[in-house]
Image (tube, rainbow, N blue to C red):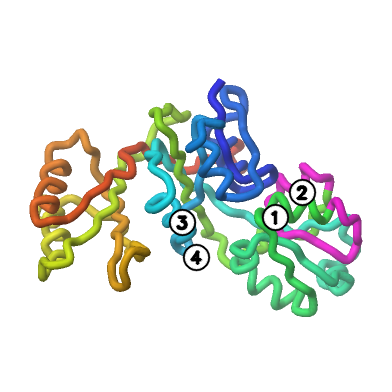
């Protein structure tokens, strides 16, 4: 049975992996730190790792991009986009009104990204509380359960509240309802997910030559005149020299096509260094139980 490392338990990463990969065919390896998730597959303790890399409103998870560029050499084998619904959980059941019960809280625990996505809710209902950041949303729910204090609550997925026997005070408390996170599955072997993929995507890492004026324009032109769509381009420092950058580029094309390999050959010819991070299927969320 293949093993998959992820942040968990009780996290959106775990929820999304269970939705797209199921719970029967794989063994999940829970990690408390993202470093451990990456290194689990690098060291061979797991076959794959699930990495969140982008959110609708927070953009790219830069730490995770830097890991992919600088720390590991494990290709992307699939990606999926999963909706993020954040809930407020406490030890005791909700009383008569959310606003009244929130006044009894002195601390809210959650992941920093989750808190940033619930600013309006926190300002309206919980402006007086201490905010404590932890490594994952699942860890937040576990900590609230362990403390057993009625004045401490967690912002976390519904699944985390259920896992640790917490009471749900409010659901969908994120500022924006169209909140989705993009996850990639990294590993050394291709994998077949449930359902049909929306498309095949290729992600590359490009370093421009130092002594070639107009290199960025020419690099982009190699894709433009072939009508190859770039769905994302983002720069990150190489950490080798001030002013030098990697470019992460998501391409809506497969390496099995004729045009994409030719484009990569063209930009390599002008001195660009190109590293293929993966050519993989992309999937979107479909509710398990349709709304009625």
10 in relation to 128, above or below = above
Q: Residues within 10 Å of mark 1 (few under 14, many from 20)?
A: many
Element assignment for label 4:
loop
The residue singled out by tag 4 in the image is 58
- The magenta span reads 145-165
Q: CA distance from mark 4 to mark 3?
A: 7 Å
In the rendering, which numbered label is found on residue 107? none
Q: CA distance from mark 1 to mark 4?
A: 17 Å
Element assignment for label 3:
strand
Tell me the residue at 56%/65% (across/down): 176
The percent position of residue 87, horizontal first and vertical second, equals 71, 57
> Would you say residue 100 sits in the magenta stretch?
no
Element assignment for label 2:
helix
Work out which quarter of the rendered image holds the C terminus and state it.
Answer: top right
Tell me the residue at 65%/66% (across/down): 115
Q: CA distance from mark 1 to mark 2?
A: 7 Å
Which badge, 1 or 2, is on the more N-terminal residue? 1
The residue singled out by tag 1 in the image is 156
Q: Are marks 2 and 4 in contact (CB under 8 Å)?
A: no
Work out whether residue 132 can be spotted: yes
Q: CA distance from mark 2 to mark 3?
A: 24 Å
Q: Are marks 4 and 3 in contact (CB under 8 Å)?
A: no
């Amino acid at each position: 049975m293949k093993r998959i490392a992820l942040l968990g338990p009780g996290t959106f990463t775990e929820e999304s992996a269970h939705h797209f990969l199921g719970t029967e065919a794989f063994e999940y390896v829970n990690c408390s730190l993202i470093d451990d998730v990456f290194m689990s597959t690098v060291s061979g303790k797991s076959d794959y790792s699930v990495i969140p890399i982008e959110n609708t409103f927070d953009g790219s998870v830069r730490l995770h991009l830097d890991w992919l560029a600088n720390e590991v050499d494990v290709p992307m084998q699939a990606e999926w986009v999963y909706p993020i619904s954040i809930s407020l959980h406490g030890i005791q059941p909700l009383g008569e009104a959310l606003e009244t019960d929130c006044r009894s809280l002195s601390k809210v625990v959650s992941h920093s990204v989750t808190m940033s996505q619930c600013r309006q809710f926190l300002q309206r209902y919980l402006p007086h509380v201490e905010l404590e950041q932890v490594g994952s949303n699942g860890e937040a729910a576990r900590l609230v359960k362990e403390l057993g204090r009625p004045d401490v609550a967690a912002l976390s997925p519904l699944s985390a509240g259920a896992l640790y026997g917490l009471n749900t005070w409010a659901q969908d408390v994120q500022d924006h309802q169209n909140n989705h996170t993009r996850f990639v599955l990294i590993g050394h072997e291709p994998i077949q997910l449930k359902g049909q993929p929306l498309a095949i995507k290729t992600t590359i890492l490009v370093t421009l030559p130092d002594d070639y004026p107009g290199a960025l324009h020419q690099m982009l032109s190699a894709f433009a005149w072939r009508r190859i769509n770039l769905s994302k381009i983002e720069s990150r420092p190489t950490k080798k020299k001030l002013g030098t950058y990697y470019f992460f580029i998501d391409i809506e094309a497969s390496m099995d096509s004729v045009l994409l390999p030719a484009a990569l050959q063209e930009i390599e010819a002008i001195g660009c260094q190109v590293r293929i991070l993966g050519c993989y299927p992309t999937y979107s969320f479909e509710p398990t139980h349709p709304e009625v």
